[in-house]
Amino acid sequence: MFIVMHQGHTERELADILEQLAHMGFAGHVSQGVERTVVGVVGQTFPELKETLEMWPGVEEVVPISKPHKLSGREFQPKDTVIKVGDVTIGGESVVVIAGPCAVETEDMLLEAARAVKAAGASILRGGAFKPSTSPYSFRGLGMDGLKFLAQASRETGMPIITEVMSPQDVELVSRYSDILQVGTRNMQNFALLDEVGKTKKPVMLKRGLSATIQEWLLSAEYILAQGNRQVMLCERGIRTFETFTRNTMDISAIPIIKKLSHLPIIADPSHGTGKWYLVTPMSMAAVAAGADGLMIEVHPSPEHALKDGAQSLNFNNFQQLMSRVIPVAASVGRKMA
């Protein structure tokens, strides 16, 4: 449920409410808008609680809700969340592009890719230092060396970086090198990891699970938000269906659905969403038209020689063409490319 404060409430009244909620075993999460302050009450509520809370000084009304995803829902925060990463804004009027290789392979390859994607218009550099793989015999990343190469590429190009963290024990390490922590599809319901990234002050990108429903996805985001980290963005990267022609089925409808249900920014990953490089550009255009706040694109200097996911990676020329195609699409829906 939500506690809507009177417009003239005092800071003391708000502090008292948060203290009382904690004493009763609830977590109180404050959202301060221009005209109203709302406190989200998280915990196992009971029918009499509404009447009790409405007696407290400073409270205008208490609104029960049935949706389990309280903190990520628009009832709690009607205004879109906007995340700042250096000079890059995610969730605003502009559509941000995150690009780079699936995995960090060598320092020279990463620097070459970073320079190329920045020149083409990307704002954030992606690259996996730790890579989850279906097969234990596939390339699983360079680990610490990969993080150092990412940091060097960031220093040289000025681009913030995003990379995946796979275990709670690695959160502190990856946070030292990365500007955005990525929680991958296989870890969407790794609740210990979600709690740990929620304790950081780093922005977090939460990818949708292979077979996750919208509600399961939002509830996973709730774990991060409940730990106090409000810098959460979602990423639609395709789901597993009966179709085998594509790697996954890119769920474009998830984008406007999330926009309706949640205030969190949503990024589209058509590389994983399709698994085929020639489908990445048309699906990127569709995602922008559907309202995506950003695109995450895999780009490699030589996809045919990539150690990971070469079939879904664009070369530099194809990435430039993608950027030229999505610009007019963004303009047609009142957006612009960052």
Image (cartoon, grey):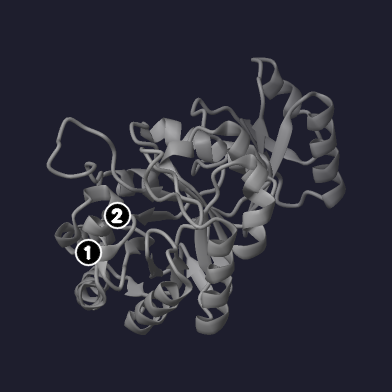
| Camera-side residue of 100 and 80 | 100
Tell me the element at label 1: helix
- Residue 67's place in the image compared with 101, above or below, is above
- Residue 219's place in the image compared with 176, above or below, is above
| Camera-side residue of 148 and 90 | 148
Kindly identify which residue carries mark 2: 309
State the residue lying farthest toward the top: 47
What's the distance in space between the residues labelled 1 and 2, CA to CA?
A: 9 Å
Residue type for callout 2 = Asp
Q: With 13 as the anchor, is 37 left or right in this view?
A: left
| Camera-side residue of 150 and 235 | 150
* Quadrant that contains the C terminus: bottom left
**Rendered residue at 24%/42% (across/down):** 248
> Badge 2: few (under 14), some or many (20 or more) residues near its Cα, within 10 Å?
many
**Disc assigned to residue 99:** none
> Badge 1: few (under 14), some or many (20 or more) residues near its Cα, within 10 Å?
some
User: Residue 86: horizontal and vertical position, in percent?
Assistant: 58, 73
User: Residue 96: horizontal and vertical position, in percent?
Assistant: 40, 69
Look at discs 1 and 2 and give the one toward the viewer: 1
**Dot placed on the residue nearer the N-terminal end, 1 or 2:** 1
State the residue lying farthest toward the left: 245
Q: With 23 as the anchor, is 321 left or right in this view?
A: left
| Camera-side residue of 76 and 219 | 219
Q: With 198 as the anchor, is 233 left or right in this view?
A: left
Residue type for callout 1 = Glu
Using the rendered view, name the quadrant where residue 114 is placed: bottom left
**Rendered residue at 19%/64% (across/down):** 281
**Rendered residue at 78%/30% (across/down):** 21
Kindly identify which residue carries mark 1: 304
